[in-house]
Amino acid sequence: MKQKVSLFEALSGFKFNVTKVDGTKVTIKTEPGEVIQHIQFKKVSGLGLPIFNQNTRFGDLYFEFLIEYPTQLEEEQKEKLKDILPKPLITNFEETEKSYQMKPASMPELEIVDEQYEERADDHHEGGQRVDCNSQ
């Protein structure tokens, strides 16, 4: 299950509800003081789907956390964060004559690499049928 959380929630903790297959609503929460990373996976044992032919046992429920970062910060907010957050990692910086502004970008070449990998994997796969996990 994918769960979006704000940067504040990722840093300070949060609770949310999940409705199980049987309709029961439960609360999921972080550990006190825990910081959630972007694209971090967590699980709750025994809260997943029933295990085949074992009606009293349940699998694990997995969560993928996606952190939503703010798109802009005011100067006042940045100053407050300097006092709270760890110090910057980029410290050895020298302003050069030329400076370039980064722009949003996609990485289509990564998709090509993935497709090539899948083709190579298919070529070397012996016996059995290839299963796509997304379709299960």
Image (cartoon, rainbow, N blue to C red):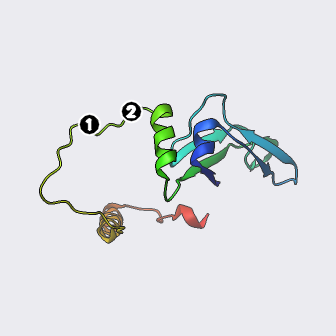
26, 78: nearer the viewer: 78
Discs 1, 2 touching: Cβ within 8 Å: yes
Q: Position of residue 81 (x, y in %)?
A: 49, 39
Using residue 31 as the reference point, say whether residue 119 is left or right of it. Answer: left
Q: Which of the image's four quarters has the C terminus? A: bottom right
Q: Position of residue 124 (x, y in %)?
A: 31, 61
Disc 2 target residue: 87
- Residue found 60% across the figure and 41% down from its top: 42
Give the SS element for disc 2: loop
Give the SS element for disc 1: loop
Q: Amino acid at mark 1?
A: Thr
Q: Residues within 10 Å of mark 1 (few under 14, many from 20)?
A: few
Q: CA distance from mark 1 to mark 2?
A: 9 Å
Disc 1 target residue: 91
Using residue 106 as the reference point, say whether residue 81 is left or right of it. Answer: right
Q: Which of the image's four quarters has the N terminus? A: bottom right
Using residue 53 as the reference point, say whether residue 103 is left or right of it. Answer: left
Q: Residues within 10 Å of mark 2 (few under 14, many from 20)?
A: few
Q: Position of residue 28 (x, y in %)?
A: 74, 41
Can you say whether 11 is above or below 112 in the image? above
Q: Position of residue 96 (x, y in %)?
A: 14, 52
Q: Quadrant of residue 54?
A: top right
- Residue found 46% across the figure and 49% down from its top: 75
- Residue found 58% across the figure and 50% down from its top: 64
